Image: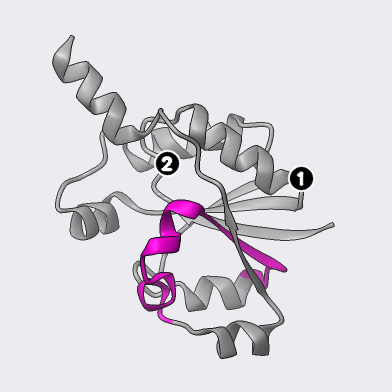
């Protein structure tokens, strides 16, 4: 089994996060590259509900996660990918309609040169951080 890289914010940890990480863990040891509060605020225009330390503690408690590391590169993921040298980069299928390569700053040739596969994992219906925030505002 190899090393599985996935990155993200993982705010308001929910069932779809768990299902996604469980699918990743079927492939190998999961390393989550966790976005900093500052990067989230720049990228999404607002800070996460849970701060970095809270999100990291929750992820570290998840049995599917081998290790959590800070996303020190912000939008430039290449340095962290080069450092970790995963076998697979796993992302949610919600990225299939977006330009993940552009977002991450690499292309398929770069991945091929690093001998890394990019895998889209189906993203479940229902729970999402956005949906949870909506529910809280309604109730």
Label ID, residue 26: 1
The answer to whether 81 is drawn above or below residue 17 in the figure is: below
Rendered position, 88 above or below 32:
below
- Give the x, y percent position of residue 114: 67, 84
Q: Residue drawn 57% across and 72% down?
A: 81
Task: Point out residue 92 in the picture as x, y percentages from the top left corner.
Answer: 50, 52
Q: Quadrant of the C terminus?
A: top left
**Residue at position x 21%, y 44% in the image:** 47
Name the colouring of the figure. Answer: one colour
Image height of 67 relative to 55, above or below:
below
Q: Which residue is mark 2?
A: 10
Tell me the mark number nearer the camera, choosing from 1 and 2: 1
Q: Secondary structure at mark 1?
A: loop
Give the image location of residue 132, x and y in percent: 30, 25
Real-space Cα distance between discs 1 and 2?
19 Å
Q: Residue at x 48, y 39 (%)?
A: 56
Magenta segment boundaries in residue numbering: 84-105
**Along the horizontal axis of the image, is 135 left or right of 113?**
left
For the residue labelled by badge 2, is the local secondary structure a helix, a strand or a loop? loop
Q: Residues within 10 Å of mark 2 (few under 14, many from 20)?
A: many
Q: Is residue 32 left or right of residue 102?
A: right
């Amino acid at each position: 089994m190899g090393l599985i890289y996935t990155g993200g914010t993982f705010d308001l940890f929910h069932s779809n996060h768990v299902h996604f990480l469980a699918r990743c863990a079927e492939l190998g040891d999961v390393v989550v590259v966790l976005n900093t509060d500052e990067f989230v605020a720049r990228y999404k225009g607002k800070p996460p509900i849970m701060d970095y330390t809270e999100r990291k503690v929750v992820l570290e408690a998840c049995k599917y996660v081998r290790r959590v590391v800070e996303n020190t590169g912000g939008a430039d993921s290449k340095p962290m990918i080069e450092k970790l040298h995963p076998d697979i980069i796993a992302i949610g299928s919600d990225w299939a309609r977006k330009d993940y390569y552009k977002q991450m700053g690499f292309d398929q040739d770069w991945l091929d040169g690093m001998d890394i596969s990019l895998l889209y994992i189906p993203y479940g219906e229902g729970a999402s951080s956005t949906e949870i925030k909506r529910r809280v505002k309604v109730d």
